[in-house]
Amino acid sequence: MRYLKPVFPLLMTSALSAPVLAAGAHVHGRADLEIAVEAGRLEIRLAGPLDGFVGFEHRPRDDAQRAALAAALAALEAPGRLVEPVAEAGCRLTAADVAEPFHHDDHHDDHADPDGHAELEAEWRFTCASPDALSAITVRLGERFPRLERLEAVFVGPAGQGATTLPGGHGRVELR
Ligand SMILES: [Zn+2]
């Protein structure tokens, strides 16, 4: 774990409702994971090129692609063991928001650009019964999404802040 210079405030009151860091570059196979902890709240945001999740970035063109996109969105809406805080912390998922890149009409695609790229974004909120025990989060997104070659994780919380790379989309993010 290497520590970042304090580029964002340690008090997360505002950061919990705003992006912690600017989104990374659009690089296929890469995604960003931003983790924020405050008191009993844990918020995790995942963002990256849609290619890493379904293998294409255009609107689904057939039933197989529609099914692949729907299955990816469903997996992210109930991440389960894909993103798992240590059990001792007693964290419970209270909200999951997954931004579907093609839900807008053609003129208002927020997440798709004219070159045919598209991004996927998911945000999970947990409440943790024993936040002091929240020492790490195990990430297994690469098991479900093998096209993810690496996740760039950053975290900020009461014990400090840091960043780590998860090759293959899995690994453990130590929060202290
Ligand atoms: Zn792309």
Image: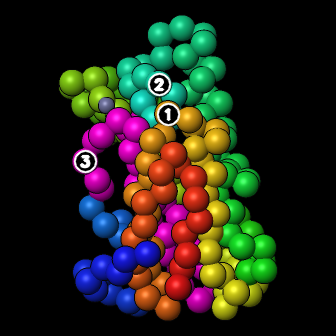
Residue 66 colored magenta? no
Q: Would you place residue 23 above or below residue 62 in this image?
A: below
For label 3, the SS is loop
Q: Label 3, on which residue?
A: 25
The amino acid type of the residue labelled 2 equals Gly
Residue at 68% x, 76% y is 127
Label 3: few (<14), some or many (≥20) within 10 Å?
few
Q: Is residue 96 left or right of residue 89?
A: left
For label 1, the SS is loop
Distance from disc 3 to disc 1, alpha carbons, whole Å, reads 17 Å
Disc with the residue nearer the chain's start (2 vs 1):
2
Q: Label 1, on which residue?
A: 147
Residue 49, image quadrant: top left
Label 1 beta carbon less than 8 Å to ligand 1:
no
Residue at 42% x, 66% y is 164
Q: Residue furthest left?
A: 114
Main SS type for the magenta part?
strand
Q: Position of residue 6 (x, y in %)?
A: 28, 85
**Residue 97 seen in this snapshot:** no
Q: Would you place residue 60 above or below residue 49 in this image?
A: above
Q: Position of residue 147 (x, y in %)?
A: 49, 33
Q: Which mark is residue 55?
A: 2
Q: Residue furthest top?
A: 62
The residue segment tinted magenta is 23-50
The amino acid type of the residue labelled 3 equals Ala
Residue 27 colored magenta? yes
Asked if labels 1 and 3 touch by Cβ distance under 8 angstroms, the answer is: no
Looking at the image, is mark 2 or mark 1 nearer the viewer?
Answer: 1
Q: Position of residue 149 (x, y in %)?
A: 45, 42
Asked if labels 1 and 2 touch by Cβ distance under 8 angstroms, the answer is: yes
